[in-house]
Amino acid sequence: MGMFLTSEKFASLVHPPEFRPRAAVPPPWPDVVKVLKVEEKGSDVNLACHLLLDAFQGNFDVAAVLSNDSDLVEPIRIVTQVLRKPVGPLSSVNNPNPELTRASSFIRRLSVSDLAASQFANPLPRPGRPDLVKPAAWA
């Protein structure tokens, strides 16, 4: 499990003035804007730690990692090359990270139908607790 950090930061404009509405602020326009930045923190480190721990403890025969994050290259390389256990990413993108692919024992492509078949029931009943309901925007 990781967490999300939200902060306001200044960011450079990729396409300044010509994409601005004519009635907006008169020129000269700033080259930067303040944006709300949401960053995920910690989950890749936690995943790497548990992958290594499980490999060292012999808790799996084969590991599959649902990620395209290059931060996982080194832990996957250690498990595959040093500990000689097969690890491979499950990828839903057409061009998985090449570094991740090189460090892995295998790669499996996930299709949209694979992802759809992997969804929990909606609503998801929880005994003694309110049902979990998927937001309509997630459909």
Image (cartoon, grey):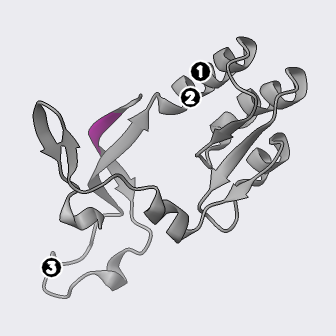
Residue at 81% x, 32% y: name it: 77
6 in magenta: yes
Residue range in magenta is 4-8
Disc 1 target residue: 50
Name which residue type carries label 3: Ala
Question: If you read the primary sequence from the N terminus, does the residue marked by circle 3 or circle 2 appear first?
Answer: 3
Name which residue type carries label 1: His
Q: What SS does tag 2 mark?
A: helix
Tell me residue 32's x, y (percent): 34, 59
User: What separation in Å lies between label 3 and label 1 (alpha carbons)?
Assistant: 51 Å
User: What separation in Å lies between label 2 and label 1 (alpha carbons)?
Assistant: 5 Å
Q: Hey, which residue is sitting farthest bottom in the picture?
A: 22
Q: Is residue 120 above or below residue 87?
A: below
User: Seen in the image, is 18 located left or right of residue 34?
Assistant: right
Rate crowding at label 3 as few (under 14), some (14 to 19) or many (20 or more) other CA atoms within 10 Å: few
Is 74 or 120 nearer to us in this picture?
120
Disc 3 target residue: 24
Q: Which image quadrant: the N terminus?
A: top left
Q: What SS does tag 1 mark?
A: helix
